[in-house]
Amino acid sequence: MFMKRCFEPKLAQTSYVIGCPGAKAAIVIDANRDIEQYIRAAESEGVSITHVTETHIHADYVSGSRELAARTGAQLLLSDEGDANWKYAFAKDAGATLLKDGDRITVGAVLIDVVHTPGHTPEHLSFLVTDSAAANDPIAVVSGDFIFVGDVGRPDLLEKAANIKGTMEIGARTLYASLRKADAWPDWLQVWPGHGAGSSCGKGISAIPHSTLGYERRFNWAFQVKSEGEFVQAVLAGQPEPPKYFAEMKRVNKEGPRLLHGFKRPDLMPVNGLEAALKAGALVVDTRAAAAYANGHVPGTINIPLNASFTTWAGWLVPYTSAFYLIVDDAAGTLIDTAVRDLAMIGLDRIAGYFDAEVVDAWAEGERPLGTVPQVTVHDLQSSLKHQAVTLIDVRNDGEWAGGRIAGATHISLGAVGDRVADIPTGKPIVVQCAAGARSSIAASVLKSRGIDNVINLVGGIGEWRKAGLPVEN
């Protein structure tokens, strides 16, 4: 048996290719939309992908299972557990085989036993993997969003992201019962989870890629809780606000992701097309670094830098209901392909075209003023706050806000800024602040795109404020 772990850092998401060289067969579990990586992994081992499955209906990325099965001719296997609200609507059309608790998938000498482990979602499955050529007992569990290293899957997403009221506590109690089911599994069992640190599918996931059940029993908080009531309270406390796009991902993955047939580069637009796009009300996302955007940008655009957080903030701020454009500083000619791939991972496929960053210079050369984002230091901000000369907006998340804040700040998380523009008073300059300055730069661009010109970014955020020894209130 072989196992290839495929990790997508911008989503903190893991897929697995597990195969049997003797049978020249392999299964892929929890594929994302970049299906070529799995095909290459199988080819490198001299096997074909014969089976494709997933642990559950994902909320944080578009599943690639349907497309991978269609591309390779592999058997698609999907959960048939859970209630009627969480069945795969496309299963019949895709020719999928439905899985129940206790089923077995055979991939040559690799035996994969299906275990229903609900809680994170009602239909969630885990897969016990046995290399029958070498052992009679399983070596690992592909646990999806059931057990992570250091944490367990959050049970509140159906309510918070999919807006199904009254499901958080039910999910928490169900998750506790699933953990009791895992009590029968041996300590040596390796845990191969679906996410790592940085994922919003848990609140304290470790950066360690895999673990053993024995280790998790000793050090994972969820295994230390001895009563259902205590577990329910603990697992629901402190969960981060799920990104806005999670609801769309649930819908897409339930109804059936459309087949991409590869990531297609959009058209390069002429520089004189930007003005028309903005006048038509199209969203234009400038993907340059925050400093470049602050120094000069085309008014009406928003800034989401093409970095490790690009996918997350695009999912918060780019609508799924209309086409949009990108501005890319792409001297090497490859960044546009990176942007397209990152956006496709979360279903943002409606890119109408892209502009090279030279469009910014061309705008200025046409005697049209560029917008800027002024920067303020923590000491200047302290002075302005003393004289009540500015309005301070803190765009960090709820947990960060609760952990300490600058006196006088108003809290509006970055993902909500666009929806709460009307709540922000504009009579004084607006200083936008986060932890270190990255999120506040994005928030400043959103406010400026909505016609609020007197926006200033706090350099270094509250981290720099603390470093300077300035007071923080709790």
Image (cartoon, rainbow, N blue to C red):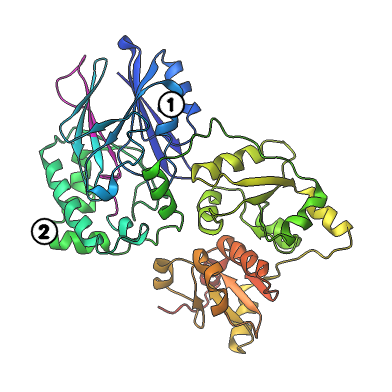
Residue 151's disc is none
* Left/right of residue 156 with respect to residue 113 in the rendered view: right
Q: Nearer the viewer, mark 1 or mark 2?
A: 1
Query: Magenta span has 151?
Result: yes
Task: Name which of mark 1 and mark 2 comes first in the sequence.
Answer: 1
Q: What stretch is highlighted in magenta?
A: 127-154
Specify the quadrant that holds the N terminus. Answer: top left
Give the x, y percent position of residue 277.
73, 55
Q: Mark 2 points at which residue?
A: 227
Q: How crowded is mark 2: few (under 14 residues within 10 Å), some or many (20 or more)?
A: few
Element type at mark 1 = helix
In the image, 132 versus 151, the foreground residue is: 132
- At label 1, the amino acid type is Ala
Instruction: Find out whether the residues at labels 1 and 2 contact each other: C-beta distance under 8 Å.
Output: no
Query: Magenta span has 422?
Result: no
Give the quarter of the image for residue 292.
Answer: bottom right
Give the x, y percent position of residue 36.
50, 27
